[in-house]
Amino acid sequence: MSRAYSGIRETRPYTYNDMGGYSLVIAEDYQKKCLKTADRTFSQGLQCQQINSLSALISLEDSVFIVHSPQGCAGCVSMAADGYRVGQAHRGVKLIKSPRIIVTNLDQNDVIMGGEKKLREAVSLAVERYAPKMIFVFTSCASGIIGDDVDAITGDMQKDNEALLVPIHCDGFRSKICASGFDAAFIAIQKYVLSKERLPKQPGLVNLFAPTSISYKDQLEIERMLGLLGAEVNYIPFYSSPDKIRRITSAQVSTSICKVFADEFMKELDVSYGIPFAHTVMPIGVRNTDKWFLCIAELLGKGKQAREYIQREHDRILPQLADVKKRLQGKRVFICGGTGRSFAAAALIDDFGMELVGLETPTYDIDAQIDIEYLNGIHNNYVVDVANMQPFEQVNLVNRIKPDVFIGVPAWSARFGIPTTHVLDPKRATMGYDGILYLGNKIASQVENPGFNKKLSVYARLPYKQSWYESDAFKFIKTSVAKTGVISTSKG
Ligand code: SF4
């Protein structure tokens, strides 16, 4: 990228991965620039950035994805691959395809002798078997450690291939922030696909960057809303094609459905191609939908139309919310999710009169700070756990705080017998104004029907000793704002 961004999110100023404490303290310390970089002395696992690079591109048509790694690295892609198949079904595709993934299967010999031969064979196989327009090559910890020069190999093979070869540097060890994987994918697209061409501008064309987790219903709703502003939507890269990728440079403006996804890429498009962008929030809940829609509308010079539409939608939706509110008012909520969606959910629950008591999110940065400052104005002091996959901290906190409902991946908290649900629903409509009603009813339904989790709590035990539940949840975070013992069952 022309701004020389490395794609490693830790290099962005004031970005933190390991932190825990109360929201008011964190927000104040961040504001004063007093937060210190910390680390966990014990960690249960991290989501690898390679999976995000892969899942961002896996639904591209006419493409093959070569994972230059031992076999296990590609294992995590099964979830994204399943999402791709389900997404095709929702889009009315009759002959459902699986993504074309080839793993080079690096082994002990390759770690010593180098993996070049296997990579060359994989590229040749991809061409012979599928005749694709693009071949993406994803690096891994193993290929990075042994120093395979993937750029040189693909550059050399490009001379004899019509398919565009695109190396993506997503070695897992390069970053602890899994969103770096999105950046690695977009840096490669900029370098190998877009830099070669600059299409004429098309007024009204909007780049809409969407991560894999967006349902088809949500895609249709967001496209419909942008259509009200007279925009033509270039929905990318999910369920997209090499031609749609190439159209990126002809857009008038860009926006993203998730504030973490493509944010760096949109800055690059602004600098290199003069495409301004709207970077706000995920359009979930009344406040976020208003904000998201208005920001892109202002860029298109359609602020007045957007405000009129928002008012009509408030008149239609807010009376209907009253019933949901009656069922959820005052319920205490613990939220865990990706950065974009967890903050969106924390704003959403205010529509239902619910109270935020805990928030777990993978990263804390200036965008998180903006959201926390907003949330601190509507919720009481709540616990924040900045953690990329640390379920042991989550269970400690949930056990202490005892929320009325947990929103997020329920695998652990459900075993306490509390109602659990999530707002990440890749199969249904969660965004825009009608999405608010769907999510409200869904949360209320879970709160009112806790039977399954109650039974689960009897038969499925969590693997932790009582002593862990009595310990400070953040005891393994060193140089953190968390003060041992401050996380109590009270509201703080
Ligand atoms: S690239 Fe590294 S971190 Fe990612 S799955 Fe492979 S070994 Fe694990």
Image (tube, helix red, strand yellow):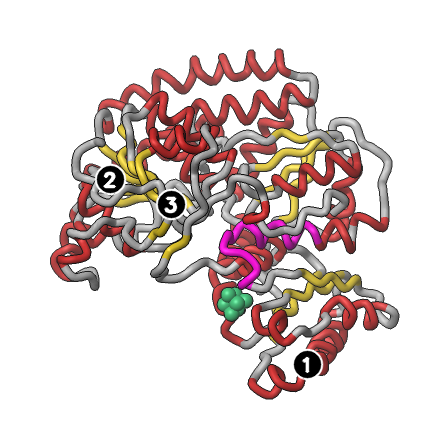
Neighbourhood count class around disc 1 (C-alpha, 10 Å): few under 14, some 14–19, many 20 upward: some
Work out whether mark 1 precedes mark 3 in sequence or the reverse, and give the earlier one. 3
Would you identify the image quadrant in which residue 324 lies?
top left
Alpha carbons under labels 1 and 3: distance apart: 41 Å
For the residue marked with disc 1, what is the amino acid?
Lys
**Residue in the image at 56% along x and 53% along y:** 88
Q: Which amino acid is tagged 2?
A: Val
User: Percent x, y for residue 224?
Assistant: 59, 30
Residue 439 forms part of the magenta stretch:
no
Location of mark 1 (residue): 118
User: Can you tell which mark lies on residue 19?
Assistant: 3
Q: Which residue lies furthest to the bottom in this view?
A: 109
Answer with mark 2 or mark 1, whichever residue precedes in sequence: 1
Callout 3 amino acid = Met
The tally of labels here is 3
Report helix, strand or loop for mark 2.
strand
Q: Mark 2 points at which residue?
A: 405
- The image shows residue 225 at horizontal and vertical percentages of 58, 27
> Is the C-beta of the residue carrying label 2 under 8 Å from the nearest atom of ligand 1?
no
